[in-house]
Image (spheres, rainbow, N blue to C red):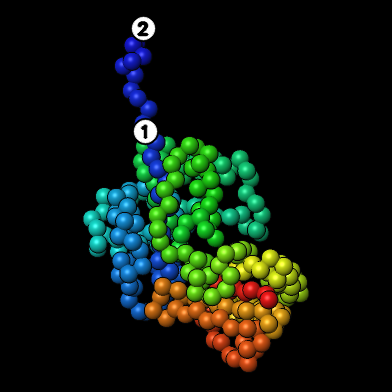
């Protein structure tokens, strides 16, 4: 009989590293040169990314562009063409939920290299993976598989916008996207404003960039005049900004929002 003590040991599982990304890579297609990564990301996150060879990402092209810039600062563990980059599954057409069994199998496949002993990087198109980001499902699957999850410091548009708004930072809620339908959106804004007033809680919402102006107009039109309203757009970019004022004063001003740069909208009812 074979000696069990001579059997090869199971590989030690790798980790899932949450690698922050910069806004200019994933979301803005301007002609201006991208800033040095070290102006936005900690050196520790850059070095961690340089040491990886396996990735899960929304877009492989974005990840390769990111790694190219990383390689200008720290030597990559493997050339770009040798990097293993798996893309997240696309959501079903029509906005439905994927079959649970199929989704679990796809996520397990994405994390198979980590189970086999490789550290795997998870990267969003911009910001922190798992925060307002479909990568959260990968993080949850990693926990279910018993893998260590290591988040690395980097920019989050939600936290940056909240900090820059001057609104309530002790109690806040990120509520994501509002309904596109005008009447439903107005009703949702009234509900959120009531919640904000009752709990003294800042509400943060986002929108697909090309709908930024429409959402801004809805906020100014439907929130109460005394409510504080803040908009932060393109934070960490050279042209980024953050402005806060009451809705009453916003109604006397004009604001031109870009339709190709992400923005975060925050409000606090008094």
Where residue 137 sits: x, y (%)? 54, 49
Secondary structure beneath dot 1 equals loop
Does residue 185 appear in the picture of this structure? no
Where residue 117 sits: x, y (%)? 36, 37
- For image coordinates 63% across by 89% down, the residue present is 249
Q: Is residue 118 above or below residue 124?
A: above
In the picture, the quarter occupied by the N terminus is: top left
Where residue 179 sits: x, y (%)? 69, 69
The residue wearing badge 1 is 12
In the picture, the quarter occupied by the C terminus is: bottom right
Asked if residue 4 lies left or right of residue 125, the reply is left
Asked if residue 224 lies left or right of residue 48, the reply is right
Q: Nearer the viewer, residue 139 or 85?
A: 139
Secondary structure beneath dot 2 equals loop
Displayed quadrant of residue 211: bottom right
Asked if residue 183 lies left or right of residue 80, the reply is right
Q: Is residue 204 above or below residue 245?
A: above
Displayed quadrant of residue 71: bottom left
- For image coordinates 46% across by 75% down, the residue present is 234
- For image coordinates 65% across by 83% down, the residue present is 247
Displayed quadrant of residue 166: bottom right
The residue wearing badge 2 is 1
Where residue 56 sits: x, y (%)? 43, 51
């Amino acid at each position: 009989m074979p000696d069990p003590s001579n059997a090869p040991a199971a590989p030690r599982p790798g980790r899932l590293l949450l690698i922050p990304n910069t806004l200019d890579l994933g979301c803005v297609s301007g002609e201006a040169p991208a800033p040095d990564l070290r102006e936005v990301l900690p050196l520790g996150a850059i070095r961690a990314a340089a040491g990886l060879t396996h990735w899960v990402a929304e877009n492989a092209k974005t990840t390769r562009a990111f790694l190219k810039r990383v390689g200008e600062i720290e030597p990559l563990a493997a050339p770009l063409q040798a990097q293993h980059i798996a893309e997240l599954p696309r959501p079903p057409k029509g906005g439905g939920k994927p079959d649970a069994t199929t989704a679990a199998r796809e996520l397990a496949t994405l994390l198979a290299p980590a189970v086999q002993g490789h550290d795997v990087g998870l990267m969003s198109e911009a910001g922190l993976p798992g925060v307002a980001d479909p990568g959260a499902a990968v993080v949850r699957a990693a926990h279910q598989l018993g893998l260590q999850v290591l988040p690395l410091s980097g920019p989050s548009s939600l936290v940056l916008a909240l900090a820059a708004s001057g609104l309530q930072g002790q109690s806040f809620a990120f509520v994501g996207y509002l309904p596109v339908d005008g009447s439903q959106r107005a009703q949702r804004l009234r509900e959120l404003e009531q919640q904000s007033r009752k709990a003294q809680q800042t509400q943060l919402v986002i929108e697909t960039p090309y709908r930024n102006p429409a959402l801004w107009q809805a906020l100014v039109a439907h929130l109460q005049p005394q409510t504080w309203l803040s908009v932060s757009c393109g934070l960490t970019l050279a042209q980024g900004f953050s402005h806060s004022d009451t809705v009453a004063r916003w109604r006397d001003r004009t604001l031109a929002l870009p339709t190709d740069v992400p923005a975060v909208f925050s409000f606090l009812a008094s």
